[in-house]
Image (spheres, grey):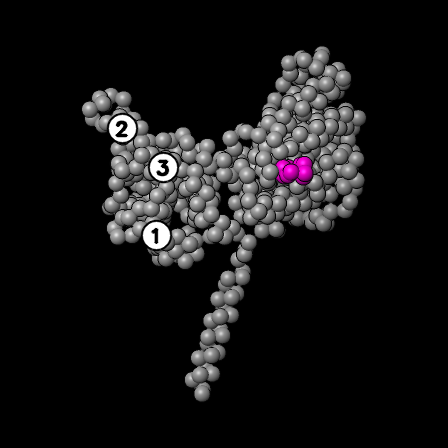
Amino acid sequence: MKFFKLFFSLFCLYLSISFAQNNDLPQDFLTPEFHKDRREQLRALLPKNSVAVFFSAAVRNRANDVDYIYHQDSNFYYLSGYKEPNSLLMIFKNEQTIDGKTFNEVLFVQERNEYAEMWTGKRLGVEGVQDNLGFRVVYNGKDFKSYNIDFSKFDTIIFENFKNDVRNTNDAADLFDLIKTFKEKISFDLMNLESLTNDKIDNKAKKRIDTKILQNLMASMREVKTIEELKLLKKAINISAIGQIEIMKAMKPNMSETEAQGVHEFVYKKYGAEYEGYPSIVGSGDNGCILHYIENSKTTIGNNNLVLMDLGAEYHGYTADVTRTIPSNGKFTTEQRLIYDLVYKAQEAGIAQAKVGNKFSTTTTVARKVINKGLADLGIIASEKSYHSYFPHGATHHIGLDVHDLTNYGKFKENMVITVEPGIYIPKGSACDKRWWGIAVRIEDDILITKKGPIILSAMAPRKSEDIEKMMKLPSVLDNFNLPKLD
């Protein structure tokens, strides 16, 4: 009886520890079923008797023996859920039988390594991938070299062309060696040596290789979001919108651009967003006229300046993209308001065109028309048809696993998520009255396209000039957050 009580106590302790371990991590990641469904969707799109080959993202070196935080290739993650480097995924159109196993997909992964895991964290390994990600046929990466696959039997071998920027490490099963082995197995390098004559390798083998179709196939899938994806994307967008709200309340003219960036990114971390979806842009005054200004190095934002803030949280792989432009002292000047309200008007016109069936270019076309007329009415350009560079970019792109997510640039479909982001940028020295110089405004929102019309997912963050001014009058939780002065 005592033994039973002891056993039961230990068993309960084990369950409680396991439960705690499982619940101190986020529970709302995409499920293995989601990734499996995506693989099935791709398989249905593949040409007959073909194989699609995907490689994980490369590890990038930051400085000496320190690497950048690893970020998986978006397509690889979308299809597998696997986040580790040095891996290879093959998806077959038809069932294959190799080494006595019958399957239609195979994944090669990082091998478990106790010493390496002590430094860089636990690896799933073969069994972990099978148990957690639902793959049935999994091998260690080192096994790919001896893997008995005959690529010559496929009508088409599909993959994205190589960038040739992958480092070779001491690991014989790293991404460099996986790519090298794959090239050898399909005679890829021979096919790309123009000096070789046709008798060295037959034209039939060359025709089997397709490095272009995969981008289009993946775009056709990724540009329309599933219910599971929309849940994560909406959370990323809401987090980003709250970041914009908090900086509106916290903004002070003596704040630095980096400090403003830090407020946004603190909100992201507070809500459990792992990363920023792209380098944060916080440009005050003339810095806002630099479209992708990421230095954020101005030590004082200054009084009477506009602050253009283009930032987005990445939550479980999905990236928001929200831009607000606010007055540093809480009040727009006359000129700032005129430009701001013109951009808002253009954005409203663009959002109204985010409808099922409309062309991808429609939002930009209508927004540009509004801006050109407005700039002419203000005397900044001579006429609506005048050439200018005050609105030098398109107004729309898709968002998702990438901030500029894959798309085939076709007509809008239900459950696409796009941005609408017109802007006006008038740098110092522009060919207009000096009173407009240094004004930069961009307003960017994330839009869900539905059968009933566009839904502004980032509407939580104020967009109208008067609503921004009202928000900036509210107290901030950071008002009394004062750190010691440093010499």
Asked which secondary structure carries label 2, the reply is helix
Residue holding disc 3: 48
In space, the residues marked 2 and 3 are separated at their CA atoms by 16 Å
Mark whose residue sits in front, 1 or 3: 3
Dot 1: element:
loop
State which tag comes first along the sequence, 1 or 3.
3
Q: Nearer the viewer, residue 383 or 424?
A: 383
State yes or no: discs 2 and 1 in contact (Cβ < 8 Å).
no
The location of residue 288, given as percent across then percent down, is 64, 28
Report which quarter residue 363 is drawn in: top right
Secondary structure category for the residue under label 3: loop
The amino acid type of the residue labelled 2 equals: Lys
Q: Which residue is mark 2?
A: 204
**Residue 448: image location, x then y, percent:** 63, 39
Q: Nearer the viewer, residue 421 or 48?
A: 48
Q: Is residue 60 left or right of residue 277?
A: left
Q: Residue at x 36, y 47 (%)?
A: 105
Whether residue 325 sits left or right of residue 21 in the image: it is right
Residue 362 visible to an observer of this rendering = yes
Magenta region, residue range: 447-455
Question: Residue tagged by mark 1?
Answer: 137
Q: CA distance from mark 2 to mark 1?
A: 30 Å
Q: Between residue 362 and residue 259, name the one nearer to us.
A: 362
Q: Is residue 280 visible?
A: no
> Where's residue 462, x and y in %?
73, 39
In the image, residue 323 above or below residue 134? above
